[in-house]
Image (cartoon, rainbow, N blue to C red):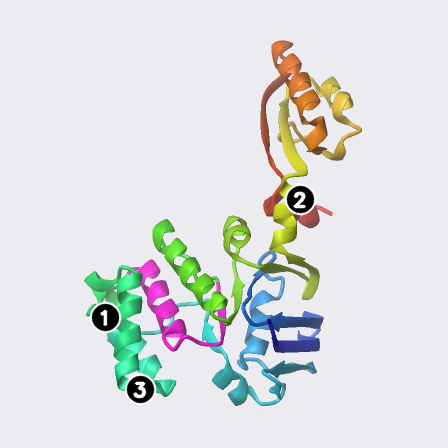
Amino acid sequence: MKKETIVVKNLKKSYSSKIVTDNISVTFYSGQIVALIGHNGAGKTTFLNQLNGLILSDSGSIQINGIDVTNHPNQARELVSSMPQFQVPIKGVTIQEAVECIGALKGMKKSDIQSSSNQLISYLNLEKWRHTTGEKLSGGLQRLTSFAMSVVDTPSIVILDEPTNDVDPYRRMLMWRHLRNLANQGSTIIIVTHNLFEVERYADRYLMIDKGQVKKDVNVSDIQTQRNLRHQVSISILDEDTIVRFSQMDSCKYDNIEKRLTFTVKKEQLKEIVSIIMDLLEEDKIISYDLKLKNLSYDYEAYMNE
């Protein structure tokens, strides 16, 4: 049974007259990967840093594992493992030294430190750079090192800010799979990312943040259920009179710059719509079309264009 691990109530943070997080109330649970999505400057990083004790809130409260850490940042940092948005400074320190150092700081036994560090370095395919110092590593390898540092002690709560930036596709998958394994063991994972495909594939839930507020709190499984019921159609238009034929469709929108019409159709309408599109292609009234299952990207774009 999932339990509450972080309970946030009416959390606010401002810088001068600019409100960065605005009355956020949300609960996080064990065994979940929760993705925070939203455009740059929406308040995601500030919210993370309030949770992990790097930023004090102006008002509201944060409880982590039943402990009120609102005004006690040191306690928050003890309870939460974090991976920051920017590279951890590891100049002059090798990958292995960096990961083992964090294990020691977190009070792990020496044998556990060595075992966990070796497993992570092997799992992430970093053996070749095990003894390479930070300044000689690429940006992607530095991100992977930072990731290994944040999970070396198998934390019960881990917060990651855009962890897969600069990482190659294969190791991105490895990172997500490791996080999924941690969640399956009961950990709470909170992650900021702009990769909506990865959110749909690996996360249990997403929070859409905009102007410092949680605008949507959605279980990813609900989206996956809806995928079989709705399809997104996109058509490049040659003859704008064609728009009328689709004007009654759900979520119908026309981009006058790209000359592109988009709308959604129900499963039972699909054959009819495809037949119409084929006729329009024959009549040279459209250039091309695209048909795909409705997904998170569509919902995200629709929200941001409201």
Q: Residues within 10 Å of mark 1 (few under 14, many from 20)?
A: some
Q: Give the range drawn in magenta.
A: 138-161
Q: Is residue 142 magenta?
A: yes
| Foreground pick, 69 / 111 | 111
Do the residues under discs 2 and 3 have CB atoms within 8 angstroms?
A: no
Q: Nearer the viewer, mark 1 or mark 2?
A: 2
In the displayed structure, 291 sits above or below 215; it is above
Q: Where is residue 295 in the image (x, y as percent from the top left)?
A: 61, 44
Q: Mark 1 points at which residue?
A: 133
The reply to whether residue 127 is visible in this rendering is yes
Q: Please, is residue 281 above or below residue 38 in the view? A: above
What amino acid is labelled 3 in the image?
Lys
Mark 3 crowdedness (10 Å alpha carbons): few <14, some 14-19, many ≥20:
few
Where does the image place residue 19, in percent across and percent down from the top left? 69, 71
Query: Residue 105, relative to residue 306: is it above or below?
Result: below
- Amino acid residing under circle 1: Thr
Image quarter (top left, top right, bottom left or bottom right) of the N terminus? bottom right
Q: In which quarter of the image is residue 71?
A: bottom right
The tag earlier along the polypeptide, 1 or 2, is: 1
Upstream in sequence: badge 1 or badge 3: 3
Instruction: Look at 68% across and 45% down and name the residue there.
Output: 302
The residue indicated by pointer 3 is 109
Mark pair 2, 3: CA separation: 47 Å
Q: Please name the residue shown 19% across and 70% down the image.
A: 131
Q: Residue 226 carries which label?
A: 2
